[in-house]
Amino acid sequence: QVQPVESGGGLVQAGGSLRLSCAASGSSLRTYDMGWYRQAPGKQRELVAIETRGGSARYADSVKGRFTISRDNAKNTVYLQMNSLKPEDTAVYYCKEDQGFFGVRWGQGTQVTVSS
C-alpha cells in the first residue's frame, strides 16, 4: 500500500471510547515517527498526538489524559485510544507517517462523531 490506512472510527455517545488503528504503509514502523491529526468541519487540521520512533509521545492539551497513542511494531500498526469522548472531538482523524528521508504519507482519514 502507498499510504497508511486508518480504521476504527464511528458514532459514539459522549463519555464513550473508541480505538483508532493505522496500518502503516511501509514495513519499518519502528523507524517512523507517527502521528494522529484531526480536522473538524470549517477548521484547520490539528495535531492530536504524535509518537517518535524513540517512543516519546506528545499530545494536544485538549486530549491530554483522555487519549493515548501507542504502536505495535510487529503488526506495523499505530493506535489511538480515545476515552471520555466529547462532542468537540468530532472530526475526521488522519494518520501521518513520517519516514524521514523517504518522506511523509497521510492516510485518507476516518470519521469520528461524538453525540451529546
Image (cartoon, grey):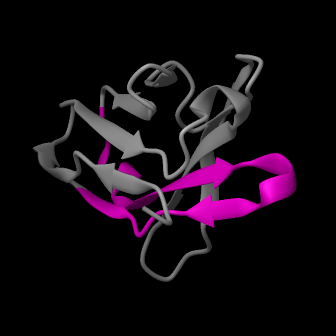
Q: Quadrant of residue 21?
A: top left
Q: Where is residue 62 in the image (x, y as percent from the top left)?
A: 57, 38
Q: In which quarter of the image is residue 104?
A: bottom right
Q: Is residue 99 magenta?
A: yes
Using the image, determine if residue 47 lies above or below residue 83.
Answer: below
Q: Does the magenta stretch include residue 66?
A: no
What residue appears at the point 55 percent right and 76 percent down from the top-left corner? Answer: 43
Looking at the image, residue 90 sits to the left or right of residue 14; the answer is: right
Using the image, determine if residue 58 lies above or below residue 45.
Answer: above
Query: In the orientation shown, which residue stands out farthest toward the bottom?
Result: 42
Looking at the image, residue 34 sits to the left or right of residue 75; the answer is: right
Q: Position of residue 74 (x, y in %)?
A: 44, 19
Q: Where is residue 35 in the image (x, y as percent from the top left)?
A: 61, 43
Looking at the image, residue 85 sits to the left or right of residue 34; the answer is: left
Question: Is residue 92 visible to the viewer in this orientation of the structure?
Answer: yes
On-image quarter of the N terminus: bottom left
Q: In which quarter of the image is residue 51?
A: top right
Per the rendered image, the range of residues in magenta is 85-112
How many numbered circles does the render carry? 0
Q: Nearer the viewer, residue 108 or 41?
A: 108
What residue appears at the point 74 percent right and 29 percent down from the top-left corner? Answer: 52
Looking at the image, residue 55 sits to the left or right of residue 96; the answer is: right
What residue appears at the point 74 percent right and 18 percent down from the top-left corner? Answer: 56
What residue appears at the point 42 percent right and 78 percent down from the top-left corner? Answer: 41
Question: Is residue 115 visible to the viewer in this orientation of the structure?
Answer: no
Q: Nearer the viewer, residue 53 or 1?
A: 1
